[in-house]
Image (tube, rainbow, N blue to C red):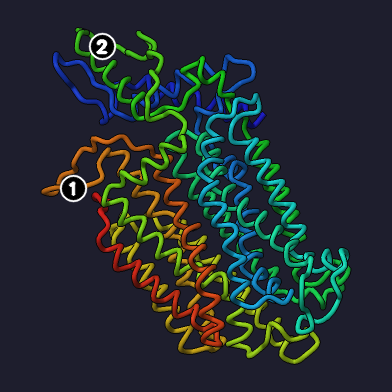
Amino acid sequence: MAEVMSEKRESNKVTDAVDQLGANNGGEHIGNGNVHLSDEEIMAGMLQTRFLHAKKLDPDYSHLFRHKNVWQLVRLSAVIVGIEFLYAAETAFVTPILLGIGLSHTFMTMIWAFSPVLGFFCAPMIASLSDTIRLRWGRRRPVLLALGIAMMTGLWILPHGKAIGVFFGDPDVPVDQMEGFRWAIPVTIVGLVLTDFDAETSNGIARAYFMDMCTPDDQARVLTTAMFIGGIGGTVGYVLGAIDWSQANLNFLGGNEATVFLFVFCVMGIGLTITVTSYREVPLPLQETDPLLRPITSSAFEAEKMRQLAVYSISKDVIDPVKAQPEAPPIGDEDEKPLQLRDFLRNIVRMPRSLFILYTTQFFSQLGYLSYCLYFTDFVGSEVFGGDSAASSDSPEGTLYEEGVRYGCWGMAVFAVCSASYSAIIERMIKLFGARPVYMGGLLLFSLGMLMMGLFKEKFVIFIVCPTVGIMYAGMYSIPYLLVSNYHSKNSFEMKDGKCVKNTTKRGFGADVSLMSNMLFLAQLIISLAIGSIIDAVGSNVVVIFSASIFSLIAALVASQIVYMGL
């Protein structure tokens, strides 16, 4: 009933907006005195046409063309809570899990390389696949569901790799007595790859799905909503990791790691179910045969704007062109065709300088963030608390290490809270100060914070530094994407004499966003292959904290050269 009332209110709202043609300040008088509709009114008319058309169909697809309230946006993006929850568990426990099955830092970090290598080559193809699926259930949801099931399988395997190895014949001995081939290692690797690769790929597919389900005005809102509730999910995940579950009479679950991953498994299942059952997608065959069920693209909007301008130019009376002459069906645009692998490769080769600088900034930002997040709890356990990851859990060193890992989780919970809070105001900050100082400021704060933590390995410093991570993280996952959107909306990637230079080479928005996401896979690959060897050579993992500071400083310097185009 609430859904029906919401649809009625939205229909009336759109109709009212169109009925007031020329009555508000948005109208402009042109030619012979007729009123020219503003962009907002044209968009309202296009949405009304599609809303009423989709409402008549069985099944009803009118939800694609109406405004959504906050709870509906939360429902759409609920899976992000599970994904951020998973990231929190990975950050806190995967490094200790891998070290706990007898791996050195060198081999442990090399194992982290499996997922980014797979993601760098496969994620764009999966994204392209999600554009072309012709199932009645839609395009994004089948892929999201398949990735979610694989992710949940990995969530069950990862914390139980050692136990599964014992089942297959591994000796049940302390880590310092392990030698030779052990089933626990390949089993744990499979669990890690399933969780890490599927989580990152699902992140992009989920965002594509809930942006598909929203009107243009709601797309920024749903992204902000996803980041906010994701921050809450990450906070809860880190808090659960900070609790000593061995004192909670839940040992039958298998200890801290198994308990936390069980919670993650449940949250992921609930979030995934809520998202994939929220709103139905238009099947691709139906969308191909019915132009009014397609998203309103920039080319369709401009075509409708020119059509209405022509109507007004030949009319001597003030009329309502939306009612007098129905909107012409949108014409297909080459830019809206599904992203193919050849387009992805072509966009890499034909990369404007502005995008190259932006990607380089994101690459160094990810290097800094990953240096911090992948080894932070290990750093706190070994360097701040003086524990040993290889020691028995019953020994003083082992006890100190586990206590440090839990303490590090509290610090990361502070980071997640600050990230969620800052994401709610970052758009306002950009409007007040501009994107350049906000972006560079976040990176410099993070660099300074990591330097402080590396120099002063004290407990209180952790809670001073972690908020700077949240500020940097919120900027890293919003401003670069806003810039790519800004470039494409202006169809320009460079400025000359203070003016935007029109782009003459066709670029796909999806391809450029995919390349931005691939900076994470590339950075994770380099960190995985290099940092472990450096840790073993230096004999201390404090090097990862200083690396995070250096990489973030480089990112800030490169960010000063980004073309912001007034953002």
Q: Which mark is residue 495?
A: 1
Q: Secondary structure at mark 1?
A: strand
User: In the image, residue 424 lies at what x, y percent?
Assistant: 46, 56
Cα–Cα span, label 1 and label 2: 35 Å
Could you classify mark 1 by the number of other residues whose Cα lies within 10 Å: few (under 14), some (14-19), or many (20 or more)? some
Q: Nearer the viewer, residue 176 or 379?
A: 176
Q: Nearer the viewer, residue 295 or 175?
A: 175
Task: Identify the residue at horizontal 55%, vertical 65% (top origin).
Answer: 416
Task: Identify the residue at horizontal 47%, vertical 70% (top origin).
Answer: 469
Residue sitting at the far left: 497
Would residue 149 be found to the left or right of residue 565 on screen?
right
Position of 43 relative to 257 (above/below): above
Three-letter amino acid code at disc 2?
Answer: Val
Residue at the spot of label 2:
311
Q: Quadrant of the N terminus?
A: top right
Q: How many marks?
A: 2
Contact (Cβ within 8 Å) of mark 1 with mark 2: no
